[in-house]
Image: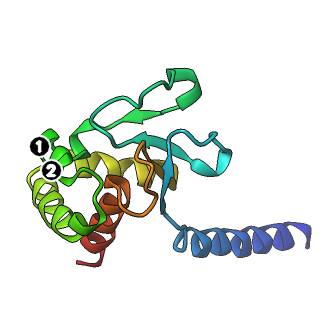
Amino acid sequence: MDKFFSNRLFDVLRKRILLVSDFICYVIKTKRVYEPPSPEDGCRVLVDRLWPRGLGKNRAAVDVWLKEVAPSGSLRKWFGHKPERWEEFKRRFFMELSRQPDGVRKLLELEEKHGTVSLLYSAKDTVHNNATALKEYIEQMKKG
């Protein structure tokens, strides 16, 4: 009787584990690199081409620096963090990203490995920045 019960319990638990694993969420967040790190950040990925001013490597707590998914220097300078250029910036940035499949693939692999990935950026504007645009690009890509 005990053996039957333990085998039955094992089967039930195994089925529940498989069911739960089908619903594991992958999350991409954005966060200013100057904000303190937290466990909820998951894998912290810096997505700026230049290292943030005045920020030491220890304080930044960056796990991965993916320069290849940052906007080109010329696009970054053209944008100049002007909100009125946001839509055109995204259009141009998405074109650049489409030519950088290896960088985007690395980011997706990090998401799959860690579950949660925080895209770190140094811009002061929390809405109009390359990390927000990159997150939007990835979400559109996943939808097909």
- Crowding around mark 1 (Cα neighbors within 10 Å: few <14, some 14 to 19, many 20+) is few
SS for dot 1: helix
Numbered tag placed on residue 74 in the rendering: 1
- CB within 8 Å, label 2 to label 1: yes
Q: Position of residue 119 (x, y in %)?
A: 43, 50
| Mark 2 surroundings: few (<14), some (14-19) or many (≥20) residues within 10 A | few
Residue that numbered label 2 is attached to = 78
Q: Is residue 131 above or below residue 142?
A: above
Give, as a three-letter code, the residue at label 2: Trp
Residue 144, image quadrant: bottom left
Tell me the element at label 2: helix
Would residue 107 appear left or right of 16 to someone viewing this image? Answer: left
Is residue 112 left or right of 97 when viewed as pictured?
right
Looking at the picture, how far across and down is residue 93, in whole percent? 17, 57
Q: Residue at x 72, y 70 (%)?
A: 13
Looking at the rendered structure, the kind of residue marked 1 is Ser
134 relative position to 62: left or right: left
Q: Nearer the viewer, residue 71 or 137?
A: 71
Quadrant where the N terminus sits is bottom right
> Which percent across, then down, holds residue 7?
76, 69
Q: Is residue 137 or residue 14 the one in the foreground?
A: 137
Name the residue located 12 percent from the left edge and 58 percent from the top edge.
98
